[in-house]
Image (tube, coloured by chain):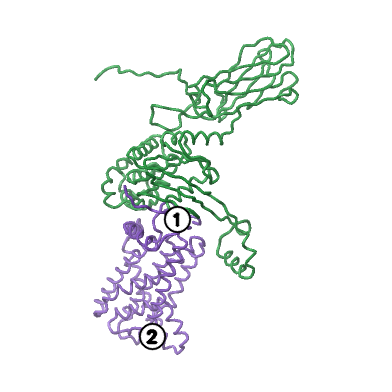
Amino acid sequence: MTVLSIENVTKRYQLNQKGNSTDDLRDTITRWSNSLFKPSKNKNTKEDFWALKDINLDVKQGDRLGLVGANGAGKSTLLKVLSQITEPTTGIVRVKGRMASLLEVGTGFHPELTGRENIFLNGAILGMQKAEILRHFDAIVDFAGINKFIDTPVKRYSSGMYVRLGFAIAAHLEPEILVVDEVLAVGDADFQKKSIGKMRDVSNSGRTLIFVSHNLTAVQGLCNKGAYLRNGELIKAGKIDEVVNEYVKTVSKFQLKQKWADPNEAPGNDQVRIKSISLTPNQEIVVDNFDTRTPLKMVFEYWNMMDNAELNVSIFLYSMTGECVFNIGDDAKIYQKGIVRAECNIPGDFLNDGSYYISAMIVKDRLAPVFFFEDALAFDILDYREGTDWYGKWPGAVRPKLITVNSVQKELL
Amino acid sequence: MNSRERIITAKKSTTDYLKEIWGFKELFWILAKRDILVKYKQTVLGIGWSVIRPLVTMIVMAFAFGKIGKLDTNTAIPFTLVVAPGVIIWLFFSQSLQALSQSIVLNSNLVSKVYFPRLIIPLSTIFLGLVDVLISIILFFIICIWYQFLPDWKLLLVPLFILMTFLAAFGIGLISAVLNVKFRDIGQIIPFVIQFGYFISPVGYLTESVRSTGQPWFYKLFVLNPVTGCIDALRWCMLDDFAAFNWDSFVPLVIFIVVTFFYSIRFFRKHENSFVDHI
């Protein structure tokens, strides 16, 4: 059953152009009085900005829809329209059942009021009846873990307590449709885990979830459907994996291949010239993106212009922050004039998810760098995990499977 | 599963709108309660301020206009009693107007993050002033006992005129609240209006004194002030036979309320959904 249907929804904002950018009373009066005399001239000063362009989307009961897209793609605007904070310029949204939106935790907390008073205030703001709040009161306090401070004004709370209380209240709403924006960006790992767990409960009980986050891992782990927005347009909607793949493909600055046909134009010097460098998945199955499981093969070719030169290749892999993850070279050998080909295999289940880049160096006589080909390749590795309910960022530069941890029951009590 | 379908579009019917406001009545009470709770948090005297303010105002008014302005020489009852209704109305009106005009901006965190009918926010401001009104009226009774003055049955009409006072403030307050979202100049204008409004309303003097100045055009302008209507009416009902009912100021008041009430709500509805774009 379709519980939410978005039909031809657009949202237009008017931007004031230069000269009219301030919005104080004086300007408006001047503009207005000017327009009495020359009405035609002022028409052109406003520029339209389309935050949403003709969005059509259906959400079925029990769906967990993840909205993905870059900043400014219109995700938040769409949520605002759905949660009725702002009206669509045109189009219709049909909603069946009670919808609660959680665009920010702790919305409407008043700093002077105590935790107890704020639970009732916030509950009412989110659309709970008083009886409902009373019923969940103890559970909310427990979930937030603020039993001791329940009668303290929230202005004295730590920011963690504040956020926990806010989420605890929202988590005990029982809407048929829950709209959540980016709550995972706040709080510590423990809290993130708790909040994801709670959102899972929502979806497991057959309710509908609409979720926006930049944490693609969380989106993929939590949602079964996805919608990808770009510049206010709906680019793709469907199964979450397909949508996320599409999104990653269009946004990442991949450089998986560089190739030169003419040695005179290629980077290098009079001793060596780069011919090509490429990175491909080292497996039969064709994939669009690399994830942590994918084995990778790097092929590097260069023109050697020297006779009887003792050369070797040294490969550097850097993480996005510029730290060198590894530097590995091959054995030096004597090469004649011509093309030299080097191959480097990076096994699957070795690198962690994240962005990486590769540089290659050609070394002569085992000590003298001949040419350093910097930032030759750039690529992203997507996250893949199973058998865990945790979707925070996996720490570390590498995530090798060959290092294992084993536990056994050593003794019975 | 609730089978009722909700439709979000650019337009909404009036009955749906009213139904929705009714559906959020709980929030209305909670917001009113919050405003009252917050008002005296972290003060030593707390609700005592609601006693001190009207009391001191009445004493100062009675002294300034009565003793110094020599207006108390020909009144049949103690001048403090004459001043009391004026002070009650003026404090309530100015407080309501101030709270109304700031209501949307002060709640911008709510307006930009959650949905509910926005009209709830300005509506709930009425209670903030009502607490003070209630305390002032109790104060008035104490003064009555002090001067051994007995008001008559007309006292029962007090709630009606208090409500009318709120409605008088409601229209302009609501329009100011909307404008204040976009033009914060309003936040500057309102305190200014409240400051001199004191003098063009019969708070510390009587409408009768204005009529007897012998300048009819001035009196005609004077009764157009809605606060004049409210104070005249309250004096009539609180002070036994001291003041006659003044239709001259009451009729403009009623017209003012009806016109501004409907216009302001229309104005508010037209703009409420774009608050978040300007706030």
Residue at the front extreme of this rendering: A1
C-beta proximity under 8 Å, tags 1 and 2: no
- Indicate left or right for A391 with B236 as reference: right
Q: Quadrant of the N terminus of chain A?
A: top left
x and y percentages locating residue B36 in the rendered image: 34, 60
For the point 45% across and 88% down, which residue is it?
B216
Frontmost of labels 1 and 2 is 1
Chain seen in green: A
Residue indicated by mark 1: B9
Foreground residue, B152 or A49? A49
Chain seen in purple: B
Q: Residue A357, relative to residue A89: is it above or below?
A: above
For the point 47% across and 29% down, which residue is it?
A383
Residue indicated by mark 2: B208
Three-letter residue code for mark 1: Thr
Disc 2, SS: helix
Residue B125 visible at all: yes
Upstream in the sequence, badge 1 or badge 2? 1
- Indicate left or right for A410 with A11 as reference: left
Three-letter residue code for mark 2: Glu
At label 2, counting other C-alpha atoms closer than 10 Å, the crowd grade (few under 14, some 14-19, many 20 or more) is some
